[in-house]
Image (spheres, helix red, strand yellow):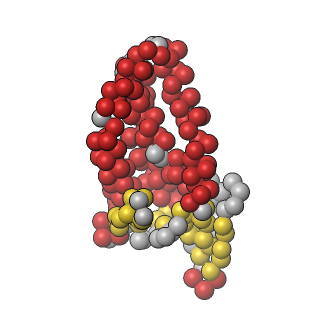
Amino acid sequence: MQNLTIMSDISNNKTEFTLSTGRVNLYSLLMIIPVTAIFLIPYILIWDYNSFEIGRKEFMKLFFYLLVLGIILHELLHGITWAFFTKKGFESIKFGINGITPYCHCKESLKVKHYRLGGAMPLIIMGIIPALAGIILGNGLYLSFGIFFSWAACGDIISIFMLRKFSSNTLVSDHPDKMGFYIEEINP
């Protein structure tokens, strides 16, 4: 992953790992086709494209409502999961909007394994599970929902990917302003 910014702060014993918003958006855009293919190809092979298209049209009719509720649920899933692993619970979780981008920020350090789990929860609950349910049931609406919210989790996938070199018990702090985090002790 190019253009990853790495900055060390020796006084705080932290190393910052961030990506620019432009890079995150570019990588997310590049992920749309493979993410779609992972779910759509098996669906079409098992069922057919026409039943997907019917479900996609239903999804588009509900799009605005699903988008608003989905954004809220996406951030809540991060917060609920991270709060479970913090000392202060929800007191350590901050929700907000940066420009037009909603966010959930954890103010406490977490183990990498807990940070990853909180990062992956929207993808699992809102993306993978509905998409697999759509494939199993032949339901194009569920599949469309799952594909869309898997796309919405692309930034989370990138963040999880950025953590791949660190051991599960390394401490990580969510970056308060940028896409990324601080590693408190380097244990690749």
- Do we see residue 130 in this rendering? no
Residue furthest toward the right? 2
Residue drawn at the location 46% of the way across and 45% of the way down: 152
How many marks the image carries: the answer is 0
Q: Position of residue 23 (x, y in %)?
A: 62, 56
Q: Position of residue 25 (x, y in %)?
A: 56, 52
* Residue 183 position (above or below residue 122): below
Residue drawn at the location 67% of the way across and 62% of the way down: 4
Which of the pair 148/60 is nearer the observer? Answer: 60
Which of the pair 130/117 is nearer the observer? Answer: 130
Occupied quadrant, residue 101: bottom left
Residue 53 left/right relative to 12: left
Which of the pair 58/175 is nearer the observer? Answer: 58
* Residue 73 position (above or below residue 54): below
* Residue 140 position (above or below residue 85): above
Residue furthest toward the bottom? 11
